[in-house]
Amino acid sequence: MKIITCVAPVNIAVIKYWGKRDEELILPLNDSISATLNIEHMCAKTTIMASSNFKENKIWLNGKEESFQNPRLSNCLKELKKRSQTQSDVINWNIHVCSENNFPTAAGLASSAAGYACFVYALAKLYEVEGDVTYIARQGSGSACRSIYGGWVQWHAGALKDGSDSIATQIVPASHWPEMRVVILVVSDSQKKNSSTNAMKRSAATSKFLEYRIKHIVPERTEKMIQAIKDRDFETFATITMKDSNQFHSVCLDTFPPVKYMNETSFIIVDLIHTYNEFRGSTKVAYTFDAGANACLYLLEEDVPEVISLIQNAFPTNTDHVEYFRGIPVTEQELSEEL
Ligand code: DP6
């Protein structure tokens, strides 16, 4: 038997991926950009066991057995086996996979990103796969390819039909902007009603606004965002981050039938952040929301204590359900292998 355990962090997009040009290969309509969070705070931990005695492949997610008959899992497995350099028999054995998240699953907190990144990375170690694995992680869940690297990461939409140029690359390491922090406000930890996969398919099929966004907004925004990150220009970075989140949720409402992820509390957070930035006289905090009601705030370390007390005042824990993870630093670490 061979056993391997890996840990993979969550990433939070500042230019959102929404819509595919190829459903099977998971090729996106646009480039996206994210930061990878500190591995200890929000991560997926996956153990893979391979044995000649296992009769079939099996997978448990957070203690519950799930079906392995999932084309995304089998595509990743197939690609990794194709690229394997191993001389060992391990490649012919069945596997048992146990994966756990230390944060709410499928509540719009990028759980599939960390999960698939971890699965692919662990199998790549087991099968001795060399080189880039982001294009394999992408075939598990699009956003997973960005969790393979630490720091600031760009997932390139690519133009080739076979998707070989749709990979993730690091823009700069986390050490380039060491003061950057993320505060996560868990507004709701219930499972989201609309999976991102189905909702973005519907957006691509019905939203003219998404078409406009892909063609006329994202290319220029991506360039500006990369420059802002390179220049450590927080104002520009924060403004683009908030605008891109708002645009993504507007596309969701332009989808037919519409998709609604943000709730009343999410909008209270949006107002609170704008009011705070106005009060401070410059943009000190940026909010961004993925496919759920939970808010991710990007801010600099020096502003974390004040913003946390602002949140505590606005949402005293006994009257509302906002919990928060304090100031998670954007991480330098790449995926780690434990055994
Ligand atoms: C809103 O990567 O979960 O978080 O590729 O279908 O698995 P699939 O979708 P997924 O979509 C994430 C969308 C998002 C934005 C982002 O992370 O860029």
Image (spheres, helix red, strand yellow):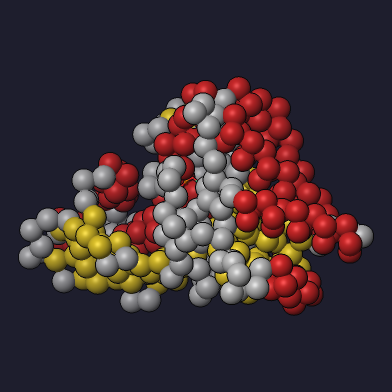
From the viewer's side, name the closer residue of 266 and 18: 266
Q: Residue at x 59, y 74 (%)?
A: 318
**Above-or-below relation of 266 to 50:** above
* Residue 276 picture quarter: bottom right
Q: Residue furthest front?
A: 319
Q: Residue at x 30, y 69 (%)?
A: 47
Q: Residue at x 72, y 49 (%)?
A: 242
Answer with left or right where residue 190 lies relative to residue 91.
right
**Above-or-below relation of 242 to 322:** above
Residue 149 in view of the camera? no
Instruction: Report the label total.
Output: 0
Q: Position of residue 185 (x, y in %)?
A: 60, 64
Tell me the quadrant of the picture where the N terminus can be found: bottom left
Q: Position of residue 301 (x, y in %)?
A: 74, 73
Tell me the quadrant of the picture where the C terminus can be found: bottom left
From the viewer's side, name the closer residue of 149 and 299: 299
Q: Position of residue 277 (x, y in %)?
A: 84, 59
Residue 100 in view of the camera? yes
Answer with left or right where residue 328 lies relative to residue 192.
right
Q: Position of residue 178 (x, y in %)?
A: 71, 70
* Residue 176 picture quarter: bottom right
From the viewer's side, name the closer residue of 240 and 138: 240
From the viewer's side, name the closer residue of 141 and 63: 63
Q: Residue at x 8, y 58 (%)?
A: 55
Q: Residue furthest right?
A: 281
Answer with left or right where residue 252 lies relative to residue 103.
right
